[in-house]
Amino acid sequence: MSSLIHSISNLYPCTDCRTDFKESVKRSPPEPHTSNKQTLQVYLCERHNEVNRKLNKEQFECDPKLLDERWRTGVKGCDGGGLHPE
């Protein structure tokens, strides 16, 4: 999984996104976060929130229980609910 994340950082067609993701992976390497499903989910959520902050979009709650529910049942679009406790 770690190799996949590093590879993705080389595959983004947008130069700015590619550079930004590479820097993110350098700051927070995936290696300690790929040992199980929960730590990987939190890691990916945190990377997603980095982008949302830059775009002034709402950030998602990175609680493993909420992430599991969201990714198991899905939501419509990135802006959809499912991660925000009521």
Image (spheres, grey):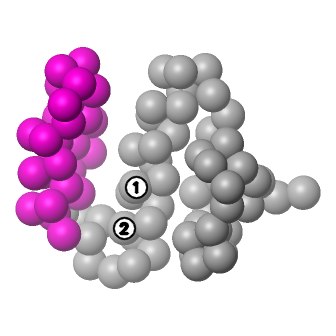
Q: Is residue 52 visible?
A: yes
Alpha carbon distance from label 1 to label 2: 6 Å
Name the residue that disc number 2 marks. Answer: 40
The majority secondary structure of the magenta stretch comes to: helix
Is 14 one of the magenta-colored residues? yes
Q: Which residues are magenta?
A: 1-30
Q: Quadrant of the N terminus?
A: bottom left
Asked if residue 63 lies left or right of residue 9, the reply is: right
Asked if residue 11 lies left or right of residue 77, the reply is: left
Specify the amino acid type for callout 1: Leu
Mark carried by residue 10:
none
Q: Residue at x 40, y 44 (%)?
A: 47
**Picture coordinates of residue 29 (x, y %)?**
20, 50
**Picture coordinates of residue 27 (x, y %)?**
23, 37
Is 29 one of the magenta-colored residues? yes
Disc 2 packing (10 Å; few <14; some 14–19; many ≥20): some
